[in-house]
Amino acid sequence: MKSKFLGRTLKIGLLILSLSGITVFMMYSDIIGRTLQSVLQLETSPGYTGGRVAAVLYDPVGDDNGSGSLTYPTHSEFVPGALDIVRYTVHEPVYHAQWVPEAEYWQLVLSFAEAGSAVRTIRIYIDADGDGSGAVAPRDEMAEGISFDPRFPWDYGIVVTPSESVFFSFDKTFSVPVDVYEADNGRRVVIRIPLRDRKLHSLYEATVTRHYVYAGAWTPWARDGFAPVSRRASSGSGGGSFSPLTPKIYDVLLPEEIDQATVLSSWNEDELTIPVLPAVEVPMTASRTANGQKTGSSGKQSAGFGLKSRIDELKRAEGAERLASEEKAAAVFETVSARYSALQGRADSALILEYALAAFHVRKTAESEAAFDLLLSDNPDNPVALAYTGSIIALRGGEASPLVAVELIADAYRYLDRAVSLAETPEQIITARLNRAYVSRAIPETVFGKARQGAEDFLAAASALASVSADPADIAGAWVDAAYCFELTGAAEEAGTWLREAERLIRGRTVPPSLERALLERGYRTK
């Protein structure tokens, strides 16, 4: 029964098609907003915001299980995702910055899947010069149970815990507190290292540094703050450990081709050896070319022509698929409408819902709304009916003046927000979240500011889709739509996280042309 419901009501392509008219009604207002921003040149000094971004390194979402089997301590503050590194952003070192406490500093940013600063210990070790000198063990070599690549010993380390934020040298001759800020509701940790000491000025000249970045569960009672791990989790220790040599690390940033579980489970009890972490290479200057790629070589141009040809091919396939979907939706509506009309007002709630959805998917919004009204008169808390009613009200904005449209959108969100709050089952959550998400994506961001909410809704829908073993392409599609919403808000790094996750999920699979095109246009390949 579940699969039939999903197949009939949650075909994402039909929902996108049905909501595509929402964008028209406020296009002029959005142009005004973008034009004002351009004319006023609303820019912020890089020195104030952390410096130009030199590199963004992504880590897979959901790999916060260390060597493959670790589980969080059972204390309620260890929320899922609190130790899950998803992104590491390195800025260019800043000098002569104005309007900030430190005129010379270096900003590093760690993004996590969820907030958790009260229970998280962060470690960053940096080979700043590549000269082979430094240390290959952490600050406390008996704490987390790992060592570092001897080719790239670390010169400087950073520790961030609830009780300590410090930048220090391997030889213990230098130590200075660092400023730590939280953003994005605690999911982003911003670290600013002061560079006023002359011995650190070599960082301004560095072209490449190598970093070891990882997170563990924090407790004040354990060695260097790393919570112990054992077979079974408890309030103060993690679970899933089957060896005393299991590293007390839940997530580590690694080079893209290296598997975390393989690295962190590479201890040897017979020889008493511990896992060795490889470093990630980090450029220290921002790329001056689009997307950080070099241009101008004949090879790149050939690849570009090939890519354009593939995108054009996908657009044609997309058009054919859209036409087939419309024809199928029309045939379904004709069949369901005949059954619905034959009963002359005696249809049960299941048939009313089927008719309402069929009418919605062929854009017969009046018929669809009337049917959803019947369902709501019987049950005002029906989240599916509330969600689609909200979308129908939003669609009216396509035929309204801007002032009326603003009122319609406000009314639409009363229905959409209520649907999300009442949704309980995976199917209800998917329906409510996707309806609100597509409305949030479609309406002008400069007027309503709903794109971030849309992104969160797409991510929630993706989680619910995964819980019912939905088609991976539908899950990846929701992630791509979330990325699009993040792009609308200017959050390019967050968008990159979910584009990469979508690429990883569908790599090697045959996917709808619209999904493949969306990824290709952003530089991500599915084959």
Image (cartoon, rainbow, N blue to C red):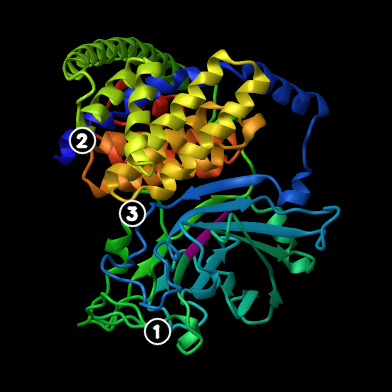
- To which quarter of the image does residue 161 belong? bottom right
In three-dimensional space, the C-alpha distance between marks 2 and 3, rounded to whole angstroms, equals 40 Å
Query: Element under label 1?
Result: loop
Residue 322 at what x, y percent from top left?
A: 31, 14
Residue 56 at what x, y percent from top left?
A: 54, 47
The disc, 1 or 2, on the residue closer to the chain's N-terminal end is: 2
The disc, 3 or 1, on the residue closer to the chain's N-terminal end is: 1
Query: Element under label 3?
Result: loop
- To which quarter of the image does residue 16 belong? top left
Disc 2 residue type?
Phe
Disc 1 residue type?
Gly
Query: Which one is in front, 266 or 331?
Result: 331
In three-dimensional space, the C-alpha distance between marks 1 and 2, rounded to whole angstroms, equals 43 Å
- Which residue matches tag 3? 258
Q: Is residue 183 magenta?
A: no
Q: Nearer the viewer, mark 3 or mark 1?
A: 1
* Magenta-tinted stretch: 208-213
- Which residue matches tag 2? 5
Provide the major secondary structure of the magenta segment. Answer: strand
In three-dimensional space, the C-alpha distance between marks 3 and 1, rounded to whole angstroms, equals 30 Å
Disc 3 residue type?
Ile
Furthest-front residue in view? 345
Left or right relative to 513: residue 75 = right
Q: At 32% across and 43% down in the image, what residue appears? A: 428
Residue 373 at what x, y percent from top left?
A: 38, 29
| Label 1: how many Cα within 10 Å (few below 14, some 14–19, many 20+) | some
- Which residue matches tag 1? 236
- To which quarter of the image does residue 343 belong? top left
Q: At 37% across and 83% down in the image, what residue appears? A: 235
Q: How many marks?
A: 3
